[in-house]
Image: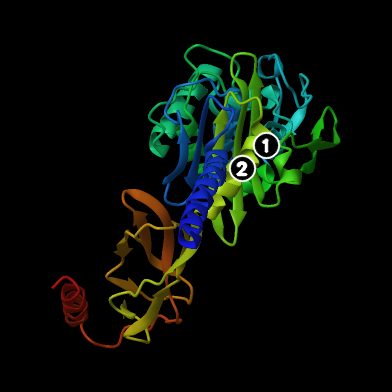
Amino acid sequence: MILKLKYFLCIAIVWLLSFCLIPIKAAEASVSAKAAVVINADTKEVLYSKNAHSRLSMASTTKIMTALLLAEQNTPDKWLITTKEMVTVEGSSMGLKVGDTVTYYSLLVGMLLSSGNDAANTTAFALAGSTEKFAEMMNNRAKQIGMDNTNFVTPSGLDDDEHYSTAFDMALLAAEALKNETFKEVASSSKITVRYGNPPYNRTLYNHNRLLNEYEYCIGVKTGFTKKSGRCLVSAAEKDGCRVIAVTLNDPDDWFDHKKLLDFGLSKVSREEITYNLNKTNISVVGGNKDSVRIATDSVFYTKTNGTNSLITTKVNMFPFIYADASKGMVIGSVKYYYGDVLITEKPIKILDNCLYTAPDDKSFLFRLKENFLLIFKHFL
């Protein structure tokens, strides 16, 4: 009788646990969005997916691409004077007027914090001369990133039947954009004071992204909304050196969903270190007071998806020799790290010593030419 009671008790416990576990797993994967994805920002592995490759409009999250193209100009202090065609655009605004003086940095802030359509439109004219030509720039950059199911028409994300992307493509875009330090600095800021106007004066712009204040590990990226698109959100989180990206398109409960998605993503990754040992520790020097100098490259940390093998491959590009003068820290090559065909990062190879140029001795020109030829030839054997 006691044995039977224990048996039925065990069955009951297992039955109850099964009911407890199912909602937990479902809660991890349940979001209100029409499409959603979470990816490992370094390897681009998909950690969670819901209609991630469905083509949908993406509203102002479009500005991630516009802002990236602007940040990649690497001229934050460059300024322009706005024209009527630049600032005449409907929707959200950073407050630009015709004749305002504004810097590229202020436009970047205006796009990523205030979601200014005027900032995006001004950027398009400044970089390409028209919104149509700028769309070509956007689509070319999208191809480079691997956004195969995306087509940009507007710089701001205003509705257009031919303006679309996918949750997965937007995650790829965010991962790429966050590699740009200027973009990351702005996208992760709750507020920034910039100066523009006629004459310019200080304005403090506030970020529409609530997650920056509500989610501890959030580092951006961009909100979006139109009646056609619904609520769209691209977010990123970083914890213990690990970075994940979450995207939802047409999601009425995006703030809540992103907290769940980012928690889920961060629970699936860990930080991994790779130490690459160069096949030689010195490089030969021609015309210096030393025959060779030491070389090295730094270790790499990346976000590894738990439960997967570290299928990291490397590609080394390096000079076979160098000429003096050569100073400590000079870059003489690089190591590229790949996860499959995804480039994770690239680290420079640097020399660790100084090597001064030495004047040629009284050897004949032909003799010195022969010596240098033999030195060079040796590296190609």
Residue 127 vs residue 220, the one in the foreground: 220
Residue type for callout 1: Phe
Measured as percent of width and height from the top left, residue 104 is found at: 66, 36
Work out which residue is located at the far left of the displayed protein and give it.
381
Residue at figure coordinates x 68%, y 46% from the top left: 188
Estimate how packed mark 2 is, as few (under 14), some (14 to 19) or many (20 or more) residues with alpha carbons within 10 Å: some
In the picture, the quarter occupied by the C terminus is bottom left
Q: Secondary structure at mark 1?
A: helix
Secondary structure of the residue carrying tag 2 is: helix
The foreground one among 8 and 162 is: 8
Q: Give the residue type that dot 2 points to.
A: Lys
Q: Is residue 49 left or right of residue 130?
A: left
The label number, if any, that marks residue 256 in the structure image:
1
Instruction: Give the number of the disc on residue 260.
Output: 2
Q: Would you say 315 lies left or right of 168 here?
A: left
Residue shown at 79%/37% (left/top)? 206
Q: Nearer the viewer, residue 352 or 28?
A: 28
Residue drawn 47% across the image and 51% down it:
11
Q: Please determine whether, in this image, residue 100 is positioned above or below residue 343.
A: above
Q: Position of residue 105 (x, y in %)?
A: 69, 40
Q: Residue furthest top?
A: 161
- Answer with left or right where residue 348 lies relative to residue 182: left
Seen in the picture, residue 9 relative to 175 is either above or below; the reply is below
Image coordinates for residue 221, horizontal then vertical, percent: 63, 40
Residue 362 at x, y percent in the picture: 27, 88
| The one of 259 and 114 positioned closer to us in this rendering | 259
> Contact, CB < 8 Å: mark 2 with mark 1?
yes
Say if residue 25 shows up in the picture. yes
Q: How is the image coloured?
A: rainbow
Does residue 359 appear in the picture of this structure?
no
